[in-house]
């Protein structure tokens, strides 16, 4: 496999490394993933995360495994292991299916499998640029924009989805200011999006998730951009927990609310949001928080918790979908993804 490099994932001399996002923003540690089992655990532990990045990480791991163990049954078994790591993010399934399809068509030619994994990496970079160019045109000079979770170079191997749109607008000298939801319970906004914005020199303000509605009520938010982990055929979409509340507030306050995602996030076989599987995570993520700073527990140790990683936002709350092919309404999605 050739060398590849992004903000959060790289291949060097046939070895796969991921930036440990659990340690950000205070430590930048790269860890090697030697096997699909290790990659599955890395994905499950959110050391690498973001729907597009998960898909790319998984297929690179699978391709490197195939180079060492070119046996179809073993490759397919490792693919299923990786597929089960995060059930909501459809990019993972789509990427694995593409690599397996190439394997089946080429009699499991490992060179072709590796080439397809490399193509998926490079494709994601291009998709991010296309979305950024399209979505940045929606942002007017000196606007305040709000985003949720992390959707930049730590969630893709390119510049990002929603955060890619924002960074492109800033590059175009639009003088924007970004409000960042901290995104509980895992603080991907507070830890990761702020880290990216600081590295890009983009002005931002970090807020608690429950402050967004108040900001909208006083006219401080001009538009909102979020990513997606799966978009159903009708336009309902799953994203990091808290997105639904944000969309409801945006609708009430008449703030434009946009979803930014590549075609790899669209699931044409999923009719609506009710059919999107929602991952339930460990109780300790709600009882406290951990990271490079250590571990803090603020609840009773046996407190009952409810911890869905994602929620589903109905298409009726979405102003538009910024895709790699253009800006669309929900009714136009199926046609947009036909080719």
Image (tube, rainbow, N blue to C red):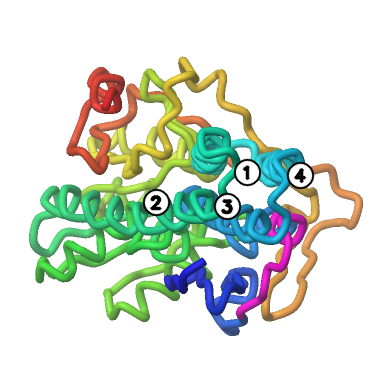
Magenta segment boundaries in residue numbering: 30-40
Which callout, 2 or 4, points at the residue further toward the start of the chain?
4
The total number of labels drawn is: 4
Residue under the image location 37 percent in, 53 percent down: 124
Nearer to us: label 4 or label 3: 3
Residue under the image location 61 percent in, 74 percent down: 15
Q: Quadrant of the C terminus?
A: top left
Location of mark 3 (residue): 110
Are the two marked residues, 2 and 4, in contact with CB atoms closer than 8 angstroms? Answer: no
Which callout, 2 or 3, points at the residue further toward the start of the chain?
3
Q: Label 1: state its secondary structure.
A: loop
Residue 32 magenta-drawn?
A: yes
Q: In the image as oriented, which residue stretches furthest toward the top?
A: 271
Query: How much space separates mark 1 and mark 4, taking CA atoms?
Result: 30 Å
Number of residues whose C-alpha sits closer than 10 Å to that of mark 1, classed few (under 14), some (14–19) or many (20 or more): many
Query: How much space separates mark 1 and mark 3, taking CA atoms?
Result: 35 Å
Q: Label 4: state its secondary structure.
A: helix
Location of mark 4 (residue): 74
Q: Is residue 81 above or below residue 177?
A: above
Q: Nearer the viewer, residue 277 or 41?
A: 41
Location of mark 2 (residue): 212
Judge from the rendering whether residue 177 lies leftward or rightward of residue 28; answer left or right: left
Nearer to us: label 2 or label 4: 4
Q: Label 2: state its secondary structure.
A: helix
């Amino acid at each position: 496999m050739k060398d590849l490099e992004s903000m959060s994932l790289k291949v060097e001399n046939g070895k796969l490394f991921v930036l440990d996002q659990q340690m950000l923003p205070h430590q930048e540690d790269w860890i090697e993933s030697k096997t699909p089992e290790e990659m599955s655990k890395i994905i499950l532990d959110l050391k690498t995360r973001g729907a597009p990045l998960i898909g790319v990480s998984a297929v690179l791991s699978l391709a490197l495994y195939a180079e060492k163990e070119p046996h179809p049954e073993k490759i397919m078994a490792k693919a299923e292991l990786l597929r089960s790591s995060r059930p909501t993010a459809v990019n993972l399934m789509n990427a694995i299916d593409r690599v397996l399809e190439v394997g089946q068509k080429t009699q499991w030619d490992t060179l072709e499998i590796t080439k397809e994994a490399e193509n998926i990496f490079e494709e994601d970079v291009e998709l991010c640029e296309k979305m950024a160019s399209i979505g940045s045109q929606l942002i007017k000079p000196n606007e305040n924009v709000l985003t949720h979770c992390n959707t930049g170079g730590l969630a893709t191997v390119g510049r990002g989805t929603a955060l890619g749109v924002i960074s492109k607008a800033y590059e175009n000298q639009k003088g924007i200011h970004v409000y960042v939801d901290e995104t509980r319970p895992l603080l991907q906004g507070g830890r990761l999006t702020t880290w990216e914005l600081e590295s890009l020199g983009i002005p931002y303000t970090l807020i608690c998730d429950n402050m967004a509605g108040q900001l909208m009520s006083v006219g401080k938010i001009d538009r909102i951009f979020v990513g997606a982990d799966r978009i159903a055929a009708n336009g309902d979409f799953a994203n990091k927990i808290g997105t639904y509340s944000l969309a409801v507030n945006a609708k009430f306050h008449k703030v434009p609310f946009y979803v930014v995602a590549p075609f790899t996030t669209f699931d044409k076989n999923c009719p609506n949001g009710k059919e999107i599987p929602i991952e339930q995570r460990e109780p300790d993520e709600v009882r406290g928080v951990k990271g490079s700073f250590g571990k803090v527990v603020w609840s009773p140790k046996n407190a009952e918790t409810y911890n869905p990683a994602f929620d589903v936002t109905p298409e009726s709350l979405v102003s538009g979908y910024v895709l790699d092919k253009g800006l669309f309404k929900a009714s136009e999605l199926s046609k947009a993804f036909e080719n």
